[in-house]
């Protein structure tokens, strides 16, 4: 457990890699005081080993550094860092909404709203369980339906 000085958050930080549909490929949970660029190899190298067809990685500005050149030399993958054009006005960063939508889906799960798990591995497992549940509901088109009360 740690404190993220930038966001003023105590506890844990979740790092995810998602596909184009927003489905979680890999999740890693670390202490909140770990820098994003230091945790990124835990997620990205595993994804690149498992999914050989990945040709481009989109990341936010917290993943800048030597990681971009390392991925290009070792795996031949282009890593594109999305940055804001203007700091004064709000503009949607291209394709960043895919990950933000996934975070919104994960935040809807009651088991992930609080840090109930003692181990970070268990918390990552809960992320996978929530995504499995979400994918199954999507596959079966199973939406919550309330039965009409009969008088």
Image: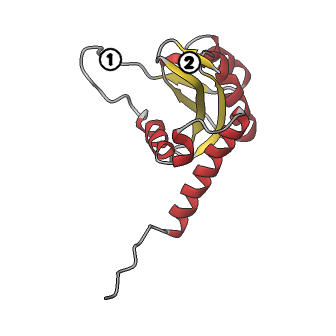
In screen coordinates, is 82 left or right of 132? left
x and y percent of residue 66 in the render? 64, 11
Task: Judge whether 143 appears above or below 111 on screen.
Answer: below
Nearer the N terminus, badge 1 or badge 2?
2
- Badge 1: how crowded within 10 Å, few (<14), some, or many (20+)? few
Residue 93 in view (yes/no)? yes
Q: Which residue is mark 2?
A: 63
Q: Nearer the viewer, residue 83 or 74?
A: 83
Name the residue located 58 percent from the left edge and 50 percent from the top edge.
131
Q: Which residue is mark 1?
A: 85
Name the residue located 53 percent from the left edge and 69 percent from the top edge.
140
Name the residue located 48 percent from the left edge and 68 percent from the top edge.
141
Residue 48 in view (yes/no)? no
* Image quadrant in which the N terminus is located: top right
Name the residue located 64 percent from the left edge and 51 percent from the top edge.
129
**Label 2 SS:** helix
**Label 1 SS:** loop
x and y percent of residue 59 in the render? 52, 26
Task: Judge whether 105 appears above or below 143 on screen.
Answer: above
Q: Nearer the viewer, mark 1 or mark 2?
A: 2
x and y percent of residue 85 in the render? 32, 17
Q: Nearer the viewer, residue 42 or 142?
A: 142
Q: What's the CA distance linking mark 1 and mark 2?
A: 17 Å
């Amino acid at each position: 457990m740690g404190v993220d000085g930038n966001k003023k958050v105590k506890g844990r930080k979740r790092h995810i890699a998602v596909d184009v549909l927003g489905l979680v490929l890999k999740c890693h949970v670390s202490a909140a005081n770990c820098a994003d660029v230091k945790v990124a190899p835990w997620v990205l190298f595993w994804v690149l080993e498992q999914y050989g067809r990945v040709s481009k990685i989109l990341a936010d500005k917290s993943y800048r550094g030597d990681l971009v050149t390392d991925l290009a030399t070792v795996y031949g993958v282009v890593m594109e860092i999305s940055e804001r054009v203007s700091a004064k006005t709000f503009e949607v960063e291209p394709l960043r909404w895919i990950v933000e939508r996934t975070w919104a889906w994960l935040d809807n799960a009651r088991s992930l709203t609080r840090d109930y798990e003692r181990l970070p591995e268990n918390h990552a497992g809960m992320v996978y369980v929530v995504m499995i549940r979400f994918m199954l509901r999507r596959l079966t088109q199973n939406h919550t339906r309330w039965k009409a009360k009969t008088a």
